[in-house]
């Protein structure tokens, strides 16, 4: 039996989590669910955005599924803190185009591997002499670990190239360490091509030549920005899953936020959550059903009959969810 921690969060996080649970209930796998709170509503209720009880639930689970959270002014981000508590140092964000969905180009299929624990997201900020200072922490240990993940993901996904993205011409010390660490690890993978680009150039290349990327490895802030850009290339955040992995834990979340502008309308795109569950099942080594889910999403989205408004349709969250689940259960693959 797989123990899954369920943290719905706020806004459409709750709605797409319902889709995720509907899918999991239909699969021929043995799950037990334990629920935790996090986010803005949790803060209003409990005075904290991430209760200790939620952390305990996540730590004793085989995997954690997170919906989305609304930012709480003056309070720490629950998802960033949960990543740190679980030491899930690698954030995997696949970017893939689908037939029938408006994309900047066809045949886009690459992975962004984002370092999850350091950089400007270390949340070390302070005021001093009428200045506000944020520390950018980059260590060789974390940089080498994330580079290794990138190369291992390249092998697992049968890709040929890993690209390190940095800004070492300006951030000479911190990104200098990140780049040096990347090439040190690259020596252990002589059969995989390795190269590097500045982050600003990469932002352009993602638009002009996205097919040239296989796996991108980068620091926390750059990875956050580039992965949202990548989602925009292939139809938006509704098709953008993500997984956070470490040595002992896995935390999985759709890339989109809580979207208060559409929360409660029943039109949130569940694909990001469903694809995120496929990543979770892959992490749990349930490869066959993970592949079925990915194929079912591709088939339903490409058919174009049941799409939410963000994809150009007029279907509801539950209608698109049911179409995908039916395809999983009935599809011959």
Image (spheres, helix red, strand yellow):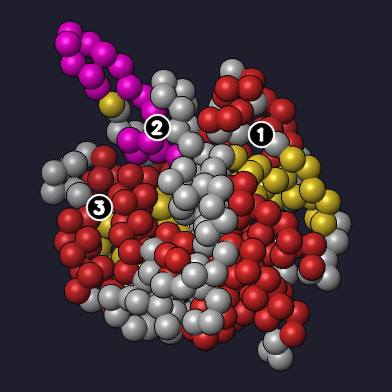
Q: Check the picture and name the quadrant holding the C terminus.
A: bottom right
Query: SS of the residue at dot 3?
Result: strand
Out of 197 and 55, give the one closest to the viewer: 55
Query: What is the x, y in percent for residue 155?
Result: 50, 74
Q: From the image, tell me which residue sits under label 1.
A: 37
Residue at 70% across / 87% down in the picture?
A: 331
Verify whether residue 251 appears in magenta. no
Q: CA–CA distance between discs 1 and 3?
A: 35 Å
Nearer mark to the viewer, of 1 and 3: 1
Upstream in sequence: badge 1 or badge 2: 1
Q: From the image, tell me which residue sits under label 3.
A: 166
Nearer mark to the viewer, of 1 and 2: 1
Q: In the drawing, does residue 110 fall left or right of residue 129? A: right
Assess whether mark 2 and mark 1 are in contact (beta carbons under 8 angstroms).
no
126 versus 166 height, above or below = above
Q: Determine if residue 251 is in view.
A: no
Query: What is the x, y in percent for residue 186?
Result: 37, 64
Query: What is the x, y in percent for residue 49?
Result: 56, 27
Mark 3 Cα-neighbour bin, 10 Å: few <14, some 14–19, many ≥20: many
Verify whether residue 125 appears in magenta. yes
Out of 307 and 132, give the one closest to the viewer: 307
Q: CA–CA distance between discs 2 and 3?
A: 17 Å
Which of the 4 image quadrants contains residue 214?
A: bottom left
Mark 2 Cα-neighbour bin, 10 Å: few <14, some 14–19, many ≥20: some
Out of 196 and 144, give the one closest to the viewer: 196
Q: In the drawing, does residue 307 fall left or right of residue 103? A: right
Q: From the image, tell me which residue sits under label 2.
A: 122
Q: Which residues are magenta?
A: 116-133
Which of the 4 image quadrants contains residue 200?
A: bottom left
Query: SS of the residue at dot 1?
Result: loop
Mark 1 Cα-neighbour bin, 10 Å: few <14, some 14–19, many ≥20: many
276 versus 156 height, above or below = above
């Amino acid at each position: 039996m797989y123990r899954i921690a369920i943290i719905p969060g706020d806004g459409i996080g709750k709605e797409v989590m319902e889709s995720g649970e509907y899918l999991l209930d239909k699969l021929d796998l043995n799950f037990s669910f334990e629920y935790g709170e996090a986010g803005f509503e949790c803060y209003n209720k409990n005075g904290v955005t991430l209760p200790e009880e939620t952390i305990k639930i996540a730590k004793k689970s085989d995997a954690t599924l997170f919906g989305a959270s609304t930012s709480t002014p003056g309070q720490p981000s629950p998802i960033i803190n949960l990543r740190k508590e679980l030491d899930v140092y690698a954030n995997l964000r696949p970017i893939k185009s689908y037939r029938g969905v408006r994309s900047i180009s066809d045949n886009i299929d690459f992975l962004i591997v984002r370092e999850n624990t350091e950089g400007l997201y270390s949340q070390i900020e302070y005021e001093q002499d009428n200045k506000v200072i944020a520390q950018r922490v980059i260590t060789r240990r974390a940089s080498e670990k994330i580079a290794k993940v990138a190369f291992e993901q390249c092998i697992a996904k049968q890709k040929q190239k890993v690209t390190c993205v940095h800004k070492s011409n300006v951030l000479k010390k911190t990104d200098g360490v990140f780049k040096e660490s990347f090439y040190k690890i690259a020596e252990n993978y002589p059969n995989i091509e390795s190269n590097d680009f500045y982050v600003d150039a990469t932002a352009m290349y993602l638009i002009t030549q996205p097919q040239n990327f296989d796996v991108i490895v980068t620091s926390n802030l750059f990875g956050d920005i580039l992965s949202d850009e990548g989602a925009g290339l292939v139809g938006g955040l509704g098709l953008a899953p993500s997984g956070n992995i470490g040595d002992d834990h896995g935390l999985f979340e759709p890339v989109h936020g809580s979207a208060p502008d559409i929360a409660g309308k029943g039109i949130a795109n569940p694909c990001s959550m469903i694809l995120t569950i496929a990543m979770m099942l892959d992490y749990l080594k349930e490869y066959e059903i993970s592949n079925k889910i990915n194929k079912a999403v591709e088939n339903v989205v490409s058919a174009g009959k049941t799409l939410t408004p963000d994809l150009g349709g007029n279907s509801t969250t539950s209608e698109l969810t049911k179409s995908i689940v039916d395809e999983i259960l009935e599809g011959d693959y």
